[in-house]
Image (cartoon, rainbow, N blue to C red):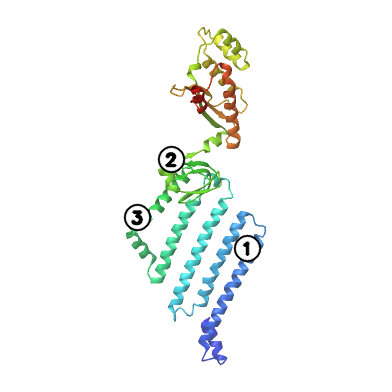
Amino acid sequence: MYNYISEILRNAGFEDFSSLIAYGVLLVMGVLACFLLRAVIRFFAGRVLKRATQREAALYILVKRASNIVIPVVFIVLARDLTGRYPFLGVLVDVASALVVLFIVFSCIKSVGAIYDNYEVSKTFPIHGILQVVMAATGIIGGIVIVAILIGQSPMVMLGSLGAMTAILTLIFKDAILGFMAGILLTTNKMIIIGDWIEVPNHNANGIVTDLTMTTVTVENFDKTITSIPAYSLISDSFINWRGMIATGARRIKRPFHIDSAMVRTCTGDMLERYKKMPLLKGHFTSMDEAGFDGQFTNLGVFRAYITAYLRSHPQIQQDMTLVVRQLDPGATGIPMEVIAFAKATAMMDFEPIQADIFDHIYAVISEFDLRLYQNPSGNDLREIRV
């Protein structure tokens, strides 16, 4: 192309400036050809993907990036006659070609991630960490190829010398390597997926996982703050994942309350008559009679049976899961009683009212069984004693 333009210029009488003008013409032709070819490719891609969905939008971005390949192609064609006279032009073209190819590969990887995110499986098996690893490896290989072109060596020689630096690189990028391995473990073992509710006490994180990359896990806390946690911290330290609770559709209630031990006594006849009139306790006394029980009832035991019956009849309690009212070891704060049950709600706004209503009822009805909650003496109690 250069020789052809120079010949035309010399025939036209521009012998003194033919070389300079030929270089300028080649440059202008190259720039115009690049812009024209890129515009044509992007125009037709836009027409085909005019009504683009998210998936097609990712493909359109890929086509736009891929259209840049015309730049080195055009200059390779135009500079073909000049590389023998000016070798550095060939080096520049090769470097430009490597860079364009590298960016196109990056675009392909990002497009794969964008398309994959449109599928439901991306929520249970995110591949952002894997794609970042692929991009990092591609960048390293691309950098080695570019350096090899600049120094005129084979890329295999550069790769061989890189092996000798592995130990040094391992020490320098220790945290990145740890994060990379942890990210792979978290992703492949499905320890965490996007959308999980996790709690990480060591990092004051309690919220929903919004992003999972090669080195970090991003959590949006319930107070709308954002916490970024190193991936290897979730492998080395403990954390709570509430995914199982949400999958079952039930959340555990596990809360104790303390009975004043001085109020526990065997039931008298009047007490039993009063308790038997309670609808929730009719089944308890009937079953005890059918079992031939001839011992003495205690007000605490009857109260425990009442709470169990109350939970069994509660519409917001999951009846096919663990439900128990148990007595713990007595201590200086009285006799601990603990309620363990599962509410038919997992969200805090739905769960807390159910739990509160249950214990409101327990606190209100406890006096009906001649019992009272244990409470340390307050300032008013001490003042009354003093009076």
Give the answer, above or below, for where 336 lies relative to 187.
above
User: Mark 1 highlights which residue?
Assistant: 45
Q: CA distance from mark 1 to mark 2?
A: 49 Å
Is residue 140 at all visible to an observer of this figure? yes
Residue 171, label in figure? 3
Residue 295, label in figure? none
Please state which amino acid type lies under the numbered disc 2. Ser
Mark 3 or 1, which is nearer the eye? 3
User: Mark 2 highlights which residue?
Assistant: 238
At mark 1, the secondary structure is helix
185 left or right of 348 in image = left
Please state which amino acid type lies under the numbered disc 3. Leu
Proximity of marks 3 and 1: CB atoms separated by less than 8 Å:
no
At mark 3, the secondary structure is helix
Mark 3 or 2, which is nearer the eye? 2
Mark 1 or 2, which is nearer the eye? 2
- Residue 176 or residue 18, whichever sits in front: 176
Residue 374 percent location from the top left of the image:
50, 23
Residue 54 percent location from the top left of the image:
62, 54
At mark 2, the secondary structure is loop
Residue 227 percent location from the top left of the image:
50, 48
Q: Residue at x 60, y 32 (%)?
A: 353
Give the answer, above or below, for where 136 lies relative to 386.
below
Q: CA distance from mark 3 to mark 2?
A: 26 Å
Q: Residue at x 37, y 69 (%)?
A: 153
Q: CA distance from mark 3 to mark 1?
A: 46 Å
- Specify the farthest residue to the bottom: 13
Residue 107 percent location from the top left of the image:
53, 60
